[in-house]
Image (cartoon, rainbow, N blue to C red):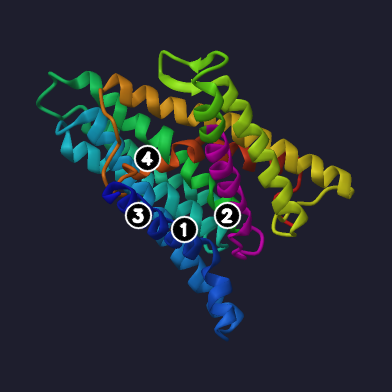
Amino acid sequence: MKNLLKRTISSLVFGAVMLLAFLSDKLFGALGVSEDVAQLCGKLIYGSVFLFALIVMMKEFLRMTCGSNYRYSQILSIMSGATLFTLTFLYTSHVLPGKLVILAFIPAFILMINSLYVKDKTRFDIFANLYTAILYIAVPWSLLNFAVLNPDTGAFNGILLLCFFCIIWGSDVGAYIFGISLGQKYGKKLFPSISPKKSWIGFWGGMLTAIGVSLALYYTGLFPLRGDSEFYSIIHCVAIAILIDIAGVYGDLIESQWKRHYNVKDSGSLIPGHGGLLDRFDSALIAIPVAIIYLIAADSLFC
């Protein structure tokens, strides 16, 4: 009971922070604040929360893969990721021109040069993980800015990103319920060498739940999608749910593979009873960029 209470409280706090990051502009608007101020507050709160999450996730990953080795280089890697996110945020906020995002490569170059000067080369094989952290976490996390900020106007709207996360969470819940109730007794395992508890029944249950959540968000008017007709808008909803579900499963398996290789149960302990932020966002790192790419290709990203 004590552990359940701890998990419940930490889940509520985590959910509240996430909702604040997505909806703070609307909260300030409801309090009578002018639209410009509400938009600015929304951007700053979202940017601060997600930049913090990026730094923590990179730190968790590097602690898992590099341990106490190359501490200064780890800082450079995190700086590179944070710079990429910040510059992308400023570009999509309509503050900086897109070409300045390339400045994010400066700390990455410094990291590369720094590798020549590290004195202890006995664990140099793990140095590659400093680059992996940037590619695996910082690059996809920076793409999330395109879901909440319009590069043409700088307008902030966190509803689309909130919908993406709702689909991910719905998929996780569905996969867990179907997997526990049926998947452990019937059918085959999904990826037993990496995650023994995941089953195909859980996978299909998660997909059905993701589609149901996506359609529910659309019919309640929360999912801001557009198509040539209502039929094509619904097609986009189903397609996004399927893509998010599949990509999210891969994201979960990818992190599980890292943890299994380094014999780690959780990436961190920031969220009591749930592990670290990387454990919470592993699916999102793959799923949401895939959804954003799909909407850009379908010309339906901004409504």
Decide which of tag 2 and tag 1 comes sooner along the chain.
1
Disc 3 secondary structure class = helix
**Left or right: 202 in relation to 6:** right
Q: Which residue is mark 2?
A: 162
Q: Which residue is mark 3?
A: 10
**Left or right: 274 in relation to 180:** left
Q: Residues within 10 Å of mark 3 (few under 14, many from 20)?
A: some
Decide which of tag 3 and tag 1 comes sooner along the chain.
3
Decide which of tag 3 and tag 4 comes sooner along the chain.
3
Decide which of tag 4 and tag 1 comes sooner along the chain.
1
Q: Measure how far apart labels 2 and 1 are at the Cα level.
A: 8 Å
Q: Which mark is residue 18?
A: 1
The residue under the point 55% across, 48% down is: 165
Q: Nearer the viewer, residue 254 or 203?
A: 203
Q: Is residue 158 a member of the stretch shown in magenta?
A: yes
Disc 2 secondary structure class = helix
Does the residue at mark 2 contact the one at mark 1 (Cβ under 8 Å)? Answer: yes
Q: Which residue is mark 4?
A: 278
Disc 4 secondary structure class = helix
The residue under the point 31% across, 45% down is: 273
Q: Measure how far apart labels 2 and 4 are at the Cα level.
A: 18 Å
Task: Give the magenta-colored segment's residue range.
Answer: 150-175
